[in-house]
Image: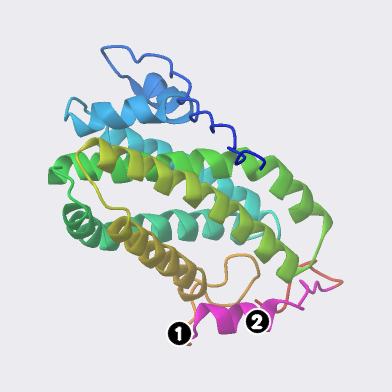
Amino acid sequence: MNPQFTPPPVPPAAPPAPEPPLPDHLDTKSLFEALLRSPRTLGGRLADGVHNATGRFALLSIISLVLFGVVLGCFAKQEQLWAAPLKITCGLMFAGLICYPSLYIFSTLAGARVSAGQLAATLAGALALAGALLLGFAPAVWIFAESTDSLGFMGFLSLAAWLIALFFAVRFLNQVVFAAGATQKGPLGVWAIVFLLVTLQMTTSLRPILGRSEKFLTSEKKFFLQHWGEQMDRTLPRTAETGTSEKP
């Protein structure tokens, strides 16, 4: 009788690599570098309440979003060179503002012991990280903005960049909230879905962002999936005289 086969033991997972330490004083430059290089360490610093980062994170996110919006504005040019960055920046800041109360509630439900000020700094940091990642995608987006007239493809490319940026922003937010004592992932996952839907609806409420229109904002109400479906196979028509588009 053959002895029973015993599978070899599974080696334990390797611990995460240590992150670079943070300086005692966090200026704007060190905060930006910490977002990219030491998110877990920065998350612990924010959870401890030793920070003065909310305003600087907000400034970093605004600058990044404005620059990314200019890149998107290069697709239709003319007034979209200032309208697109204005809409993207104001829309995302407004989405963060209206979703902040629910973030506090869901973080508390998750078990985190975090103050309103600490959570505001965390959300501002998450938006700053998302803006930095969008800025990293900006050169590739600009290439297509200058070389294609497909509204559907540009919309897909912009959405893909935002989803990737939002993934890392939510991961940073989770790290801070769990450093503050959270024990459950479910409530934070629900909030992330709510925030995602709000930002996606903003792309329709503030339209046009990629295309052009005679109006700065449209008063017609639409769900974002309906609007995207209508734009998917459209291109950016241009007149021979002015080189401008005739439709949003």
Look at label 2 and name its amino acid.
Answer: Gly
In this rendering, position of residue 200 left or right of residue 186: right
Q: In the rendered image, which quarter is residue 7 located in?
A: top right
Q: Is residue 7 placed above or below 159 in the rendered structure?
A: above
Secondary structure category for the residue under label 1: loop
Q: Helix, strand, or loop for circle 2?
A: helix
Q: Which residue is mark 1?
A: 219
* Residue 91, quarter of the rendered image: bottom left
The residue at the point 82 percent across, 74 percent down is: 239
Quadrant where the N terminus lies? top right
Magenta highlight range:
222-239
- Whole-Å distance between the Cαs marked 1 and 2? 19 Å
Q: Are marks 1 and 2 in contact (CB under 8 Å)?
A: no
Q: Is residue 225 left or right of residue 184?
A: right
* Residue sticking out furthest to the right: 240
**One can see residue 76 in this view:** no
Front residue of this view, candidates 16 and 10: 10
Q: Does residue 230 show up magenta in the picture?
A: yes
Q: Residues within 10 Å of mark 1 (few under 14, many from 20)?
A: few
**Residue flagged by tag 1: what amino acid is it?**
Ser
Asked whether the viewer can see residue 109, the reply is yes
Residue where numbered disc 2 is placed: 229
Residue at (72% x, 70% y) in the render: 152
Residue 235 x, y percent position in the rendering = 78, 73
Name the N-terminal-most of marks 1 and 2. Answer: 1
Where on the picture, by quarter, is residue 157? bottom right
